[in-house]
Amino acid sequence: MPAPLDCRTALPTLPPALLERLRTADEVLVLTGAGVSAESGIATFREALTGLWARFDPAQLATTEAFVQDPARVWGWYEWRRRQALEAQPNAAHRALAAWAERHGRLRLVTQNVDDLHERAGSRDVIHLHGSLHAPRCFDCARPLASPALPKTGDRLLAPPRCPACGGPARPGVVWFGESLPAEALATAWDLAERCDLCLVIGTSGLVQPAASLPVVARQRGATVVRIDPQPAADFGGDWQLLGAAGAILPALLERL
Ligand code: BV8
Ligand code: ZN
């Protein structure tokens, strides 16, 4: 596996083999994580969370147990994140991926993110492996619920609204740790990983399963795996690492294709 390419100041001349693959790929799978929304001002998971949440570990809050134990703290955290997402704008990375898909025609976008910035940048048929901040449902009867009006202030403890049908508490429409991923989304993503000949892994630390296995499956099936991230991955089993911000690298890459 070649050394990571330093793209932090500008996109360097790309190795011919990489450029050829980017230009001629037949089926492209793109897997994104929180890093693709970082330049929109949305904190990633592994940066310290600001405000009321600085002292909580997301993996502790993003669980059914945490919600049962303190619904107002978990619901309040997600409403704080939903506000962040609503106040954010898609960045150049989101827009470049939407443009790439339009031009290529056989590029599918799978995201671990629960914001809607890919959609707002124009991406279609986005596969959300971990759900969405914009699809609350009843914790007890699973009925879809409307997102309530956001309170005036940001990060607060908030009692979840009640289900009009059974009175149960609303829960965010995300996949918590220990919960299964939406079966159809996972099956579609897995099938894409097995069929693609190019897999772009953008803005994800690759720590959460089963999403992190998608690029591994793709490579096992012969795909070229390209990772875009400012931080090199020590145990990267793919082919190319482009070091830098997705919002800078993706538009520059698109110009080269
Ligand atoms: C499951 C939604 C089982 C919620 C998320 C023990 C007990 C229980 C489970 C497990 C266990 N051990 C392992 C597991 C499995 C567990 C797991 O993987 N745990 C990890 C922590 C070890 N997985 C699960 O629980 C999954 N379910 O396994 O079910 C099961 C099986 C059968 C039957 C029943 C159950 C569910 C996992 C989904 C959890 N939900 N999100 C929410 O958002 O609150 S995960 C959440 O965290 C995100 O969705 C995402 O997946 C993950 C965060 O990762 P990243 O997106 O990668 O973000 P991160 O901050 O880590 O990295 C950002 C990257 O961007 C960095 O590399 C950074 O350098 C880079 N970056 C920064 N700026 C930029 C940039 N890159 C480019 N440009 C920039 N400008
Ligand atoms: Zn209900």
Image (tube, helix red, strand yellow):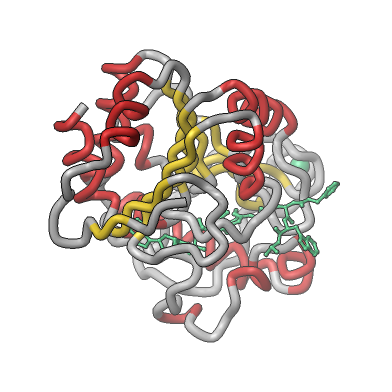
Tell me which image quadrant ligand 1 sits in: bottom right
158 or 211, which lies in front?
211
Q: Residue furthest bottom?
A: 55
191 shown above or below 204? above
Total marks shown come to 0
127 shown above or below 242? above
112 or 150, which lies in front?
112
The answer, for residue 84, to whether it is visible in the render is: no
190 shown above or below 31? above
- Residue at left 23%, top 47%? 249
Asked whether, in this view, residue 120 is left or right of residue 141, the answer is: left
Give residue 82's quadrant in the image.
bottom left
The image quadrant where one finds the C terminus is top left
Give residue 123's quadrant in the image.
top left
Asked whether, in this view, residue 166 is left or right of residue 207, the answer is: right
- Residue at left 61%, top 72%? 73
Residue 216 at x, y = what percent?
A: 63, 43
Residue 114 at x, y = what percent?
A: 50, 47
Residue 194 at x, y = what percent?
A: 64, 26
The answer, for residue 223, to whether it is visible in the render is: yes
